[in-house]
Image (tube, helix red, strand yellow):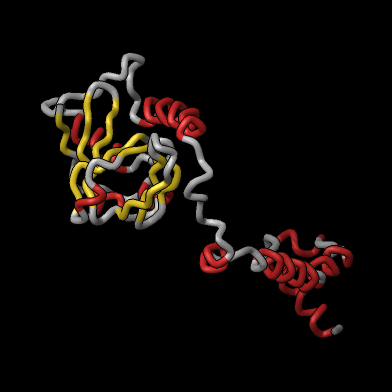
Amino acid sequence: MDHAMSDLKEFITDLVVPHHRRSVNINQDHITMLEGSKIKKQHSRKRRAHKSTTLSRKEYAKLGLNTLPTKQMKYEEALPLHNLWKGYVREHLALREGGEVPEVHDPRYDEFSKQLVKLDLHGAKLRVTQSKCSTLENLSGICVMDTKNVLKLLGKDHRLRTVPKSECVFGLKVGNMEFTIFGQHLNIRPAERSVKKIKNFVEPFM
């Protein structure tokens, strides 16, 4: 221990400018604090161990925490969520009060369409315009869950339907235009989609 202490004092002294080294007065308490770093490491390990007790995605799904009841939700109950989404869209896309969006020939349109695909769709009104499964076509509703592979739409008949993204093409109305969004462009979790680099732009139709 004495040898280690001597080496430590020498190391600290070497950090000082040479012509000031004679006046160095090493405080033993400071060295004790350096030795106490092991205790700090033990505390940090305990904190990491405590964090590891949070549920993983598989455990979260196993407990059914990522599901919604299919017949206990009312369409009217989702309307406030839709109103919040409209305010979120105006802010995210920097739309004016009137809701006007850039025309296709507008230089701003390319960037606008890329930001549109990055939107969080919770609260959006969506319609399935095309699908490989004909029974899904023309389904519409407010999106109450947006996961990596599916959207859950609550219809006016108060039924919650699960729609696979990759199998469908969706219609989304923003401001004065309605957009066609291919589900394959949405096939990623909302949090990851918001930072993903989008190469293709979204086609609008009137």
Q: Residue at x 67, y 67 (%)?
A: 53
Front residue of 2 and 168: 168
Q: Quadrant of the N terminus?
A: bottom right
Describe residue 36's horizontal placement relative to residue 102 as left or right. Answer: right
Q: Residue at x 11, y 27 (%)?
A: 105
Q: Position of residue 17 (x, y in %)?
A: 68, 60
Whether residue 18 is visible: no
Describe residue 60's horizontal placement relative to residue 3 as left or right. Answer: left
Q: Is residue 195 above or below residue 87?
A: below
Front residue of 67 and 121: 67
Q: Is residue 10 above or below residue 186?
A: below
Q: Residue at x 76, y 67 (%)?
A: 43
Front residue of 165 and 55: 165
Q: Is residue 38 above or below residue 206?
A: below
Q: Which image quadrant for residue 31?
A: bottom right
Q: Which image quadrant for residue 54?
A: bottom right
